[in-house]
Image: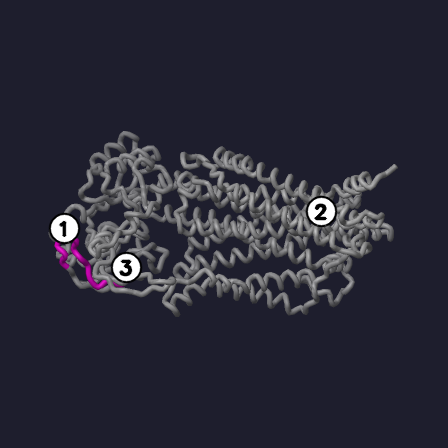
Amino acid sequence: MMTMQSLENKLQKASRKQAALYLLCNFVSLMLITAYTVILFSPTILNVLPEGGDSRKQLYAVFAMALFGCVIFTIYAASLFFRKKSRQLGILMALGASKKRLAPGLFREVALLSGFSSLTGIVAGIPFVILLWKIFRLFIVDSDEMNLVINYQCLFVSAAFCLLVTGCACIMAYQYLRKTNILDVVQEEHKNEPVKELGCWCGPLGIFLIFAGAVAGYYSGSVYQALFQAYPPSWLNITYAPVFIGLYLVMMHTVIHGWVSHKKKPYKNIISRSMMKFQGKQTVNSLIVSTILIAGGCFAIFYIPVLATAQMIDINNHEYDYAYHYRADQNVPSQREVVDLADSYGLSLKDWKECPYITLGMDGYEEIQDENLAFHVEYSPLLNSGNFLSESSYRKMTGQKISVPPKSYYALTGTQSSGSLFANVNATNLINMVTREKIEVTFKDYLHFDLMAGNRKFYVINDLDYDEISRKLSPVWNGTLVYFNAAGKDNYNFASTFFHTFVDSFGPECELPLYYDPVAKIAKEEKGLTYWGDTDSMSAVSYEEADSSDFRLYWAYMPQFRILDRNDFLTTFSVYLMAFMFVALICFAAAMVIGYTRCQAIALNNRYVFDDLKRLGGSPGFLTAEVRRQCIIVFRIPALTGMALMTLLYSMLLYANDNRLTSSELYSLLVCLGVLGVLSIAFFLIYRYTVRKIEDDLGIRKIK
């Protein structure tokens, strides 16, 4: 005799596919979130990415997008589960089971499914990270910095996410139990959720809002700062809101109208279009979440080609194979010693050039932060330092024919740059830091030479001015600049040995990052203030870690050896590359799982439609075509939209650097497009697998 308990168990067994789908969704979400938080909290990552830097901000931004996507995804998976679960509940209620009788079993099942899938996802997240990290170290790059350290405080985030998932599932279970109409409960899984019909205007308007929101959000901070003379507050990010409104309208247009006109053939593909439209709310939600995740993944993965392409082009554009500078009070290898070292490696050197330079103080204007993010601009008679060459020395080192007028100065920037973020172009005085003598100057223009560009802050002044202002400067404020080439094929072992010999020749007084400014330190101390560089831990570099990313990127006297920089690129940026690659992988994996789940839901919810079509004589080829039309929209639209959004955003970011796109930036974008091509193939393969799986589930595999 069948009891109510045995019937309940039988119905649960019949709905095991939906339970398995719910388990899979929760498991994947918790595994991905756990894996992400392991990376985000790991000292391996945090020790390399500077606090407050753009790289760390990008990781946090993508994490927020991934977290949002996974939350919506798990809630959506739970709603699908309960839509199917409602039939089981309705049958039991029709047979006389009370809600009080059903509640313990339902909540027990929900807690078991949610808790088990969440806990296993959390447990699997850490081995997942370790496995991928080891694969990366084994096949791509390995270094001492790549030793993954796990901070288990990251599990608090996973635990909070687990509680959120379980709590939402219990709330949904309670809501379904509150329903009183048994027929409504039984037929819940067949209820459609069409979206409100909007005109064809929603698509073009959505595209416009996406572009308008991207531009408004990107430039709102600059506009706010100019209008209110204050740093932009975090709430100003609301100016990106039109992007999400536009995204919603684009997805609505996709579901309701599609992007191909049906006026001439209104009945073409009417079945697949109707199924998509009748379940519009669920489809629109999943499309939006997938788009956000794909956009976040592209934002992370673009970091790699943009960084790598720019670095490689910059290295190849160096005018000399070897370039370095040093303070006059340091005992670095002489030309004879360098030549002898090269000879020991069978390497000849040529084009040896060296010249003196001096470090001077400069006046200028600085932003002083007030309360509530406000700031004011204040003139400082002693602001920062600059490294100055005489015009004759500059001509000797670069071969460029220039003439610098008296009482003026030029700033150095790259050959592809029109300006520099690091140059002080507002100085009116150059100051000898020993005698405190000054000469009045005006900024003339920029000169272009890659080896003196960037935050090394090199300038060129008139020969007579140089002789005048450099009198009585101590060795601390004097330096030497050296360039030379390898005669024939270069030797990496020589470059590596010379680099470590060069580093070992410096004293502890030069163990400083390149943004540590000695003049700014003196200026602050003369005002009775503490210089930030003496307190900020992110400014530390160590001779003992000469091969670390921090040292290679931030040491004030880091030499530029072409063969060393090229061969050690992956090692130097290994942690950066791994972090962003891993983040991108998580976002793309979540988007693929959401696409697969949504397609499965469409097929399961419309099984009766496909059964009716088979009874009416629909061939396997016809039914397969209907499945493909459903699935292609779920995969193609989010992929195209997310990729297009990030391509637009990165183009804006690169353009905003100096209001133009340089050749290296254009190459970077081309490489990014190549990456998108590879991603498109990956999404296509998942789409093909999903179609085949649905064909098997519905029993409509085309017979060839």
Residue drawn 52% across and 49% down? 63
Specify which label sits upstream in the sequence, 2 or 1.
1
Q: Which residues are magenta?
A: 425-437
Horizontal arrangement in the rendering, residue 101 relative to residue 375 (left or right): right
Q: Nearer the viewer, residue 551 or 236?
A: 236
Q: Is residue 308 left or right of residue 321?
A: right
Q: What residue would you read off at disc 1?
A: 473
In space, the residues marked 2 and 1 are separated at their CA atoms by 76 Å
Residue under label 3: 424
In this picture, is 271 found above or below 205?
above
Residue 595 locus on image (x, y percent): 65, 49
Q: Which mark is residue 691?
A: 2
What is the magenta segment's predominant secondary structure? loop
Q: CA distance from mark 3 to mark 2?
A: 60 Å
Residue sitting nearer the eye, 654 or 128: 128
Residue at 39% across, 39% down: 568
